[in-house]
Image (spheres, helix red, strand yellow):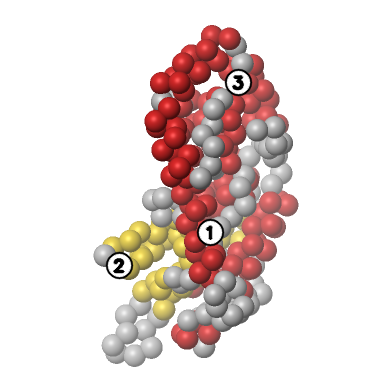
Amino acid sequence: MSEPLNLPPSAAAGLRRAQTRLRSPEYQVGFARWLAQQRDFVAKWEAEYGEPFPRTPEAAIRMAIRAGMPYSEIMAATLRGVIPVIEGWLQRLRDQRVMASGAEDREPGKADNWEASGFPGWSKWHNWGFGLDERRNWHLFHFRRPTGPRHVARWIHHRRAVVSFAEGLMTELALKLAEEGVIREQDFVRKINPEVSGLRKHLRKIVEAEGHCLKADPLARDNEHRLWRPKARFGRARKRDRAWLFDPTES
């Protein structure tokens, strides 16, 4: 668990302080005692997720950071509160690997018939949606406007699209958009312009993989309020019966 993490300075300093506390003999003995009592749970956990269980407090902290859990919540949580977040992250990674393996079966640039032929408004970012479900998996949607009396306006789920964001700050930025509708500069202790630019490029690549090339900027800078507003829609994805629904977040 010695891999370096790309943390903001205040978080890195806090992590070092926490590591000093976690390395104390009293804490290590208590954690080792708890781990010894949970052998069956640990064995089932490793078989389920295909990853080694975090056997030190530091390992749990680092995995929680990679899972996108806010640093302040990690420091305030117990191991019992951190483990479900790590489990959700590992489940998302597993689901994404399954989705990616299925996507490899189709030709590059090819999609479902309605995607390949285009749809009204495909070139406008506000007709594209990125939804986060309760298991913290991401989904891609597009908005279909009625083109006839039998059609209704609704968000269409791109069932084969693989949507994921790099661990760390890019995931944190995407979560901000899904939960708050904007990215506020004041929420970060350092400049995040490079990461926002990276997120822009990544959003374009996700849509390009579905056969559509959008040239417009998916994230607009609001200099007056020192924030970024997405032209693409972000929000929550939920499954009802067998259909995926999208609920955009209002900024």
Badge 2 element:
loop
Instruction: Please report whichever mark, 3 or 2, sits nearer to the chain's N-terminal start.
Output: 3
34 relative to 139, above or below: above
Residue type, numbered disc 2: Arg
Return the mark for residue 97.
Answer: 1
Residue type, numbered disc 1: Arg
Badge 1 element:
helix
Q: Return the residue at label 3.
A: 18
Identified at 60% across, 20% down, the residue is 18
Disc 3 crowd rating (10 Å Cα; few below 14, some 14-19, many 20+) is: some
Identified at 47% across, 57% down, the residue is 95
Residue 156 in sight in this render: yes
Residue at mark 3 to residue at mark 2: CA–CA distance: 44 Å
Q: Return the residue at label 2.
A: 242
Left or right: residue 235 versus residue 62 is left
Q: Where in the figure is residue 108, as x and y percent of width and height?
A: 62, 78
Residue type, numbered disc 3: Ala
Q: Work out which residue is located at the far bottom of the displayed protein and give it.
A: 148
Residue 232 in sight in this render: no
